[in-house]
Image (spheres, rainbow, N blue to C red):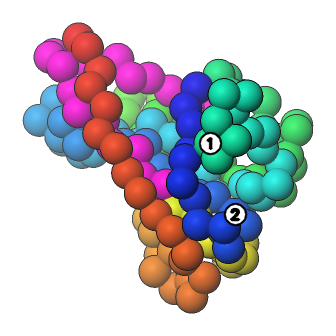
Amino acid sequence: PFYIDELDPSVQYLHWEFVDPDSIPVCGFQWNHWSLANLPVDALMYDFNDSHALAIPADFSRTVSAMIPETLQGRTSAASPLLQGRSTDPAVTMRYNGPYPPDKDHEYFLHVWGTTAPLAGLNQGFWLNELEHALRDSRSIADQGGIFLTGKA
């Protein structure tokens, strides 16, 4: 679980990526652990202890499609054609996975954007670059922020 705090009041939709740039020496590319788009802010609960912090509950990636169907989840790196024996199961390829650093502690990055309108042109199972293109093309970004988080090996 995590919380999104001090969000600009004009934000109506949230979008995020959770990535591991420290995976590059291990597998040759940044591992995309989770991406999400077009999550309506009004579909979320505020933290009971902080009326300004939106709560993203544990296991949200596994329940959001049923609870908030207009929210889109992107493909993770588990869907990469570079992986031998890769899964085609959306529960693996389009849901949060990890972090499980295989070699040493890794610094993961969670980047959250807030917009006043949903992002256009995305579908379930979008790739991370499609999210980034939609954000670049959007004229409705009202807020953004990020945090590095250490995953222990």
- Estimate the spatial distance between the alpha carbons at disc 1 and disc 2, rounded to whole Å: 15 Å
Figure quadrant of residue 138: bottom right
Q: Amino acid at mark 2?
A: Tyr
Disc number placed over residue 13 in the picture, else none: 2
Looking at the rendered structure, the secondary structure element under dot 1 is strand
Quadrant containing the C terminus is: top left
Q: Nearer the viewer, residue 25 or 8?
A: 8
Residue 82 is situated, as x and y percent measured from the top left of the image, at 34, 41
Q: Earlier in the sequence, mark 1 or mark 2?
A: 2
User: Is 25 within the magenta?
Assistant: no
Q: Is residue 82 visible?
A: no
Note whether 94 is above or below 127 in the view shown.
above
Q: Amino acid at mark 1?
A: Ala
Figure quadrant of residue 67: top right
Q: Is residue 90 left or right of residue 136?
A: right
Q: Is residue 9 visible?
A: yes
Note whether 136 is above or below 114 in the view shown.
below
Disc number placed over residue 95 in the picture, else none: none
Residue 4 is situated, as x and y percent measured from the top left of the image, at 56, 45
Residue at 41 percent of width and 57 percent of height? 145
Q: Which of pointers 1 and 2 indicates the residue nearer the eye?
A: 1
Magenta range: 94-112
Residue 144 is situated, as x and y percent measured from the top left of the image, at 46, 63
Q: Is residue 129 left or right of residue 24?
A: right
Residue at 77 percent of width and 58 percent of height? 40
**Which residue is denoted by mark 1 in the rendering?**
53
Figure quadrant of residue 103: top left
Residue 36 is situated, as x and y percent measured from the top left of the image, at 61, 51
Residue at 60 percent of width and 82 percent of height? 140
